[in-house]
Image (cartoon, grey):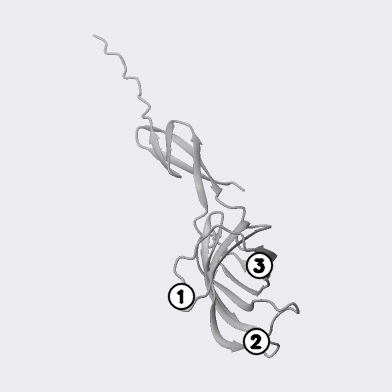
């Protein structure tokens, strides 16, 4: 989606110039929307855990495509708390970083006191999303995640902030009586002064 902003400039001695600036979001995420995240994230991602916590037994990198977000990737650790659920599964906490096109966020996961499935899964978490940046700035999210033998089974949602964070990937400016330079997504506007012809002197 492109958003257009019209700016009118008038400078003494210079003809008026009307400039139209169009920004293009860096991701397909729709601001202010709640996006369901119900998918199996296979443990075949390429991301790395930035800093695993003491006691972590693994770094899991996973990915899946989610409608409204694109390719979602993350890397997380897993720390056992020494407890076992009543139905016989070990309890872990988890912490990690999530990436989408144009943004990142952190998440924490606390253990759920059930296995979450009948096939002896590895762990069961309740996740909370926080500290988003880019298109995930201000985003919130929760989810129920079962780590199930090489797959994280997510059931949750992410709610994007109404402002959508800093989602501009570039600026295109068009108009009259001016030139435009676009550098790294920022536009510098250069106005060309329109010279007025001086009346010819007569004797």
Between 159 and 87, the residue placed more toward the observer is 87
Q: Earlier in the sequence, mark 2 or mark 3?
A: 2
- The kind of secondary structure element at disc 3 is loop
Alpha-carbon neighbours of circle 2 within 10 Å: few (<14), some, or many (≥20)?
some
Q: Disc 3 designates what residue?
A: 150
- The reply to whether callout 2 and callout 3 are in contact (CB within 8 Å) is no
Quadrant in the rendering for residue 93: bottom right
In the image, residue 144 sits, relative to residue 67, either above or below, namely below
Q: Is residue 141 visible?
A: yes
Label 3 and label 1: CA atoms lie apart by 21 Å
Q: Residue at x 47, y 41 (%)?
A: 8
- The reply to whether callout 3 and callout 1 are in contact (CB within 8 Å) is no
Q: Disc 1 designates what residue?
A: 53
Q: Residue at x 62, y 48 (%)?
A: 1
Tag count in the figure? 3
Q: Position of residue 130 (x, y in %)?
A: 52, 71
Looking at this rendering, what residue extends furthest in the left direction? 203
Q: Disc 2 designates what residue?
A: 113
In the image, residue 58 sits, relative to residue 135, either above or below, namely below
Between 175 and 33, the residue placed more toward the observer is 33
Position of 67 compared to 162: left or right?
right
Q: Position of residue 181 (x, y in %)?
A: 42, 36
Q: Nearer the viewer, mark 3 or mark 1?
A: 3
- The kind of secondary structure element at disc 1 is loop
Identify the disc placed on residue 199.
none
């Amino acid at each position: 989606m492109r958003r257009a902003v019209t700016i009118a400039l008038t400078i003494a001695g210079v003809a008026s110039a009307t400039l139209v600036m169009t920004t293009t979001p860096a991701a397909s995420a729709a601001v202010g929307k709640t996006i369901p995240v119900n998918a199996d994230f296979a443990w075949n991602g390429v991301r790395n855990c930035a800093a695993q916590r003491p006691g972590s037994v693994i770094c899991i990198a996973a990915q899946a495509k989610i409608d409204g977000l694109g390719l979602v990737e993350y890397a997380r650790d897993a720390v056992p708390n020494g407890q076992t659920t009543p139905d016989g599964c070990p309890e872990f906490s988890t912490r990690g970083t999530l990436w989408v096109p144009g943004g990142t966020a952190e998440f924490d996961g606390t253990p759920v006191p059930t296995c979450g499935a009948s096939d002896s899964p590895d762990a069961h978490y309740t996740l909370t999303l926080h500290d988003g940046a880019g298109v995930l700035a201000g985003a919130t999210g929760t989810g129920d995640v079962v780590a199930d033998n090489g797959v994280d089974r997510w059931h949750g949602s992410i709610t994007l902030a109404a402002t959508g964070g800093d989602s501009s990937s570039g600026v295109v400016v068009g108009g009259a009586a001016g030139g435009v330079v676009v550098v790294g997504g920022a536009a510098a506007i250069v106005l060309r002064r329109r010279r007025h012809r001086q009346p010819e002197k007569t004797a």
